[in-house]
Image: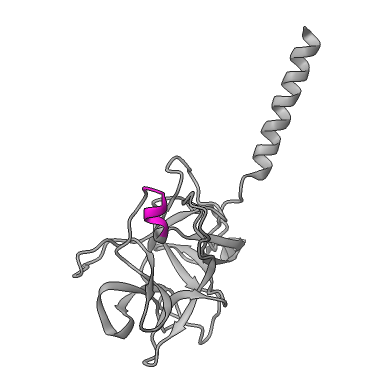
């Protein structure tokens, strides 16, 4: 009996180790700290010097006013408007790579009266998938598939990906990087692309050089 209990304990322990090993790594901000759901962060271009700044909101393609679009600030000195992340598992205490999540702008005066949650929308005139606001937070499933993103990469640089796994449908979902679409007027729009927009994350109101100066 003791041998049986020991064997079962061994199997249980190995199963736990296997589960722990398969759990995706947490996403880290520029200071090496784990990104937490509900906390405000800036998403900033990893390319310095002419690469543009952080992610913010602006008019949609073709100067469409509503819903607002997700764009990149032109200046390297502009860290953009902060966002927060909501993992598909509301009990998760950290944001993990390769895991479905919602991205939401922090509150601001939104004359469109829509939500601040990001979503992917196909623009027929331009034949392009753009990232806009007015998405739905939570309620994972086929009806909310357009609202789920993933973060891929390794510290300190990451990319955003649209490759939702929240729908059980057998139909093949779009799976692409989020990159930059350059408008004729110079606006840099977040859109699905074959070239990723490489970024880092910095906590709102926190010095991005803290980890460097503290060593």
Residue at the extreme top: 1
Q: Is residue 99 above or below residue 119?
A: above
Return the residue nearer the eye: 191 or 97: 191
In the image, residue 188 sits, relative to residue 13, either above or below, namely below
- Residue 209 visible? The answer is no
Q: Is residue 203 above or below residue 75?
A: above
Q: Which residues are magenta?
A: 139-145
Q: Quadrant of residue 127?
A: bottom left
70 or 205, nearer to the observer? 70
Direction from residue 214 to residue 63 in the image, left or right: left
Q: Residue furthest front?
A: 170
* Residue at image point 36% right, 83% down: 125
Q: Is residue 185 left or right of residue 64?
A: right
Q: Residue at x 47, y 65 (%)?
A: 207
Residue 107 percent across, percent down from the top left: 27, 61
Task: Identify the image quadrant of residue 186.
Answer: bottom left
The x, y position of residue 46, in whole percent, is: 55, 74
In x, y percent, where is residue 30?
54, 63
From the top left corner, tell me how far across and down residue 191 is, in percent: 45, 75
Q: Is residue 83 left or right of residue 134?
A: right
**Quarter that holds the N terminus:** top right
Query: 97 or 61: which is nearer to us?
Result: 61
- Residue 179 painted magenta: no
**Left or right, 175 with reference to 203:** right
Residue 160, visible in the rendered structure: yes
The residue at the far right in this view is 3
Q: Quadrant of the C terminus?
A: bottom right
Q: Is residue 21 above or below residue 135?
A: above
Number of numbered discs overlaid on the protein picture? 0
């Amino acid at each position: 009996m003791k041998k049986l209990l020991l064997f079962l304990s061994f199997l249980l322990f190995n199963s736990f180790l296997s589960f722990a090993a398969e759990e995706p790594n947490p996403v880290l901000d520029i200071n090496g700290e784990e990104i937490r759901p509900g906390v405000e962060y800036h998403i900033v271009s990893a390319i310095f010097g002419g690469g543009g700044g952080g992610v913010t909101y602006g008019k949609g393609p073709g100067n469409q006013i509503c819903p607002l679009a997700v764009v990149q600030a032109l200046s390297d000195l502009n860290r953009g408007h902060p966002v927060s992340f909501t993992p598909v598992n509301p009990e998760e205490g950290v944001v993990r790579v390769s895991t479905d999540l919602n991205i939401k702008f922090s509150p601001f005066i939104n004359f469109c009266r829509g939500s601040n949650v990001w979503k992917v929308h196909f623009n027929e005139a331009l034949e392009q998938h753009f990232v806009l606001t007015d998405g739905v937070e939570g309620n994972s499933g086929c009806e909310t598939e357009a609202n789920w993103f993933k973060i891929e990469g390794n510290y300190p640089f990451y990319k955003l990906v649209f490759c939702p796994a929240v729908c059980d449908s057998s139909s093949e979902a779009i799976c692409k990087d989020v990159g930059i679409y350059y408008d004729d007027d110079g606006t840099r729009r977040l859109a699905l692309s074959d070239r990723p927009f490489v970024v880092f994350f910095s906590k709102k109101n926190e010095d991005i050089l803290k980890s460097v100066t503290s060593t």
